[in-house]
Amino acid sequence: LHEFSIAQSIVDSVVHEAVAKHASRVREISIEVGQLMQIDSRILKSALNLLRSGPLLDHTRIQLHPVKARFSCRRCGNKWTMNETKRQLSTVSQQLLVREPNSRELPLHFLPYFYNAFLRCVKCGSTDFEVSAGKEIMIRRVVME
Ligand SMILES: [Zn+2]
């Protein structure tokens, strides 16, 4: 599972850092989860809870922060978010979309490498844009003692 390998690398890197800094325990781990990453936060959180072990991570508080996707046009400089792509996405074949159960969010959880094929700048129509947020998983903060 995607979420489990991500959880494993988060745990590994936090433990690595804690050991390097001679910490006795990790109080808190704060993780940013990009909207385009196709991550189920609940699964990621249970994976993290399953994988942490040992005194270092016994009482660690784990917090996940969703990061909305943001796009930025290389031609006209326009910046926009997922909500503004609603109409474009309605033309995408439903078979390519993965709907999240119980979610009112846009079904933009198709494979990340597809968005360049289906999205364009909402202002000038260019397909030359970059994803400026929402496509990464980052450890934002680790509190150790
Ligand atoms: Zn543009």
Image (tube, grey):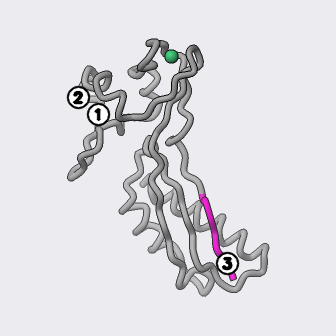
Circle count: 3
The foreground one among 72 and 98 is 72
Task: Give the magenta range.
Answer: 139-145
Residue 143, magenta (yes or no)? yes
x and y percentages locating residue 37 in the rendered image: 46, 44
Instruction: Please name the amino acid that badge 1 sits on.
Output: Leu
Residue matched to label 1: 97
Q: Are marks 1 and 2 in contact (CB under 8 Å)?
A: yes
Residue matched to label 2: 94
Circle 2 sits in a helix, a strand or a loop, which is it?
A: helix
Q: Earlier in the sequence, mark 3 or mark 2?
A: 2
x and y percentages locating residue 39 in the rendered image: 41, 51
Q: Is residue 17 above or below residue 69?
A: below
**Which quadrant would residue 95 be assigned to in this image?**
top left
Q: Report how far apart the C-alphas of labels 1 and 2 lie in the structure.
A: 5 Å
x and y percentages locating residue 74 in the rendered image: 59, 19
Quarter occupied by the N terminus: bottom left
Secondary structure character of the magenta stretch overall: strand
